[in-house]
Amino acid sequence: MTAFLFIIFVVLLLFSVPIAVSLGGASLLGIAFKTSIPTFIVAQRMVGGINKFPILALVFFILAGNVMTEGGVSRKLVQFANAFVGKLAGGLAIVSTLAAMFFGAISGSSAATTAAIGSIMIPYMKEAGYKEDFSAAVIACSGLLGLLIPPSGTMILYALIADVSILRLFIAGIVPGVLIGLSLMCVEYFISKKRGYKALDLEKEHVSKGKIFRDSIFALLSPFIILGGIYSGIFTPTEAAGVAVFYGLFVGVFIYRDMSLKKLFKACYGSALSAAVIMFLISTASIFAWLLATQQIPQHLIRMVTSVSTNPKVILLLINIGLLVAGTFLDNVAAITLLTPILHPLVVSLGIDPVFFGVVMITNLAIGQVTPPVGMNLFVVSNISKIPIERIAKEALPFLAVLIFDLFLITYIPGLITFLPNLLLY
């Protein structure tokens, strides 16, 4: 049964069938030909996979990111970052990463962060003389911070499947997210210094840093309102997503006055498309994962892995390698939905904190966003810059090396992940 499922799934993927349809098709054929289970269970399990209240947070954070992009918030964040770090060597590359860190704390999406920052920064970087391939690679790698810096839609999904605290997972992602952001900035600085890339003032006129800060204050308040409200207990992550949408509309309409009815429709339409794709993927992946669970795949995996070693450090090494490979072929939503039910029992049986493992897993899959053939950020930035994915991926190699180093750093120094949750939560 298990072999049949995976063979059908792989065959469908080889014929360029979308991942969601491949998962659903393999599940349906597996049930029809390899079990006596009635096929209507497919519909029941698909609906059950998305019939969870916290999934609303995913939808609202997608909408919040699009609303703030159309409402001018992302542009203000870029201007603020440029005013304070833009004068460094490679300043515009560093600005891109810093702006992505701020915007990632609003949108919760890697693709949304890549699109929002890339559409603004790539033209400026081109004008300043940056190599186009390098500019695109910077944006793609910076965009993955949308998965790591809370709030993150992928973290919400993992928390739902693994049954762990969303709040604890959000707090656990702060230090790794900042660490990776700073690491990317260091790579950008040294490459830019070597190549002679300089900054470009985004402002047509000379404006003081004080004025830029005042103009950007409402954009800068966005992550503090969202995350501060969650961490203080004023509202839940799902409620915070709704607040983010309302705040984005308020700022876009009444403060920056960039939000028109046309832009609002564009934000809603784009969010509806993105949410529909993600919800369909979650629903089909949930039936596939359920079928694997009925075949006791997690239990077989535990026995197989523990026969090799019972040392958690060795097991984490093997899992990291496996997830890095999986991330090159699977979208992060599909990977989380498929692999969490399999890997979660394994790490728990070894005494590994599931919140710690969640951050490690999401970091692996974030790296997958910039590795072909399925790296979503590569596709997004390729569409913006009109540069082939192969050229962007080649220029991203130094960043990938640092990302993998950071991955193993947080894996084997778990305090980088667990320190803040243990300090702030009891």
Image: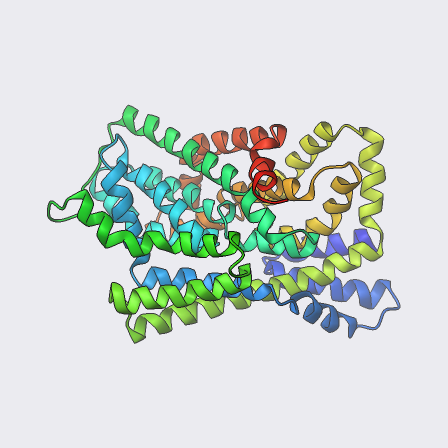
Left or right, residue 304 beside residue 329: right
Name the quarter where the N terminus is drawn.
Answer: bottom right
User: Outermost residue, right direction?
Assistant: 36
Front residue of 415 and 121: 415
The residue most toward the top is: 194
Question: In the displayed structure, would residue 403 be above or below residue 139?
Answer: above
Counting every numbered tag in the picture gives 0
Q: Choose top left, top right, bottom left or bottom right for residue 350.
A: top right
Residue positioned 35% across, 60% down in the render: 69
Q: Is residue 95 left or right of residue 315?
A: left
Tell me, yes or no, if residue 201 can be seen here.
yes
To which quarter of the image does residue 317 belong? top right
Closest to the observer, 182 or 112: 182
Residue 418 location in percent, x, y? 60, 37
Q: Is residue 162 above or below residue 401?
A: below
Identify the image quadrant of residue 356: top right
Residue 414 at what x, y percent from top left? 62, 32
Front-lying residue, 38 or 359? 359
Q: Is residue 388 toward the left or the right of residue 199 in the image?
A: right
Q: Is residue 14 visible?
A: no
Residue 382 location (% of width, % of height): 39, 49
